[in-house]
Amino acid sequence: MRTVNALEVRNHLGAVLDHLERTGEPVIVSKGRRPRAVLITVEDFQKRFVDRQTEEHRKALLDRVQAARARRAGDADSLTILRGLRGELR
């Protein structure tokens, strides 16, 4: 993993981005000898953050669907439920 200071990033951003694209290794940006940020490739960002958020959203949606199924009206089929709503049950 390469470490560059903020001044180098400011003066040579293109070269830093080329290095990042070529190697795929994250680049640590430091300021005052302290790490302040990390540059990562778009692919890493999607794998680590976007895909994770999508998976969490999918799981939450699945939980909502399963909860809705648990609340449904017994084991009656949809035709029986419809007839009951219409008042056609005999």
Image (cartoon, grey):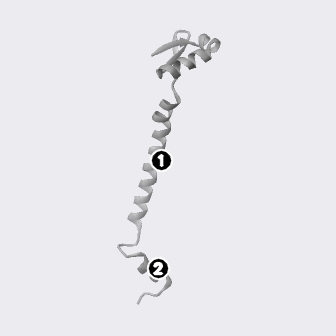
Which residue was labeled with disc 1? Answer: 57
Q: Badge 2, how many Cα within 10 Å: few under 14, some, many 20+? A: few
Q: Closest to the observer: 6 or 45?
A: 45
Residue at 39 percent across and 76 percent down: it is 77
Disc 2, SS:
helix
**Where does residue 54 sit, x and y in percent of width and height?**
48, 44
The residue shown at (56%, 16%) is 16
Task: Give the secondary structure at mark 1.
Answer: helix
Q: Residue at x 41, y 69 (%)?
A: 72
Extreme-bottom residue of the structure? 90
Residue 62 picture location, percent across and down: 42, 54
The mark nearer the N terminus, 2 or 1, is 1
Using the image as rendered, state which of residue 21 and residue 73 is in the foreground. Answer: 21
* Residue 15 marker: none
Q: Residue furthest left?
A: 75
Q: Amino acid at mark 1?
A: His
Taking the view exactly as shown, the residue that stands out farthest to the front is 22
Could you tell whether 27 is left or right of 71 in the image? right
Q: Is residue 3 above or below residue 69?
A: above
Quarter of the picture holding the N terminus: top left
Q: Where residue 18 sits: x, y (%)?
A: 56, 19
Q: Is residue 89 above or below residue 2?
A: below
Residue position marked by numbered label 2 in the rendering: 82
> Whole-Å distance between the Cαs marked 2 and 1?
32 Å
The amino acid type, in three-letter code, at marker 2 is Leu
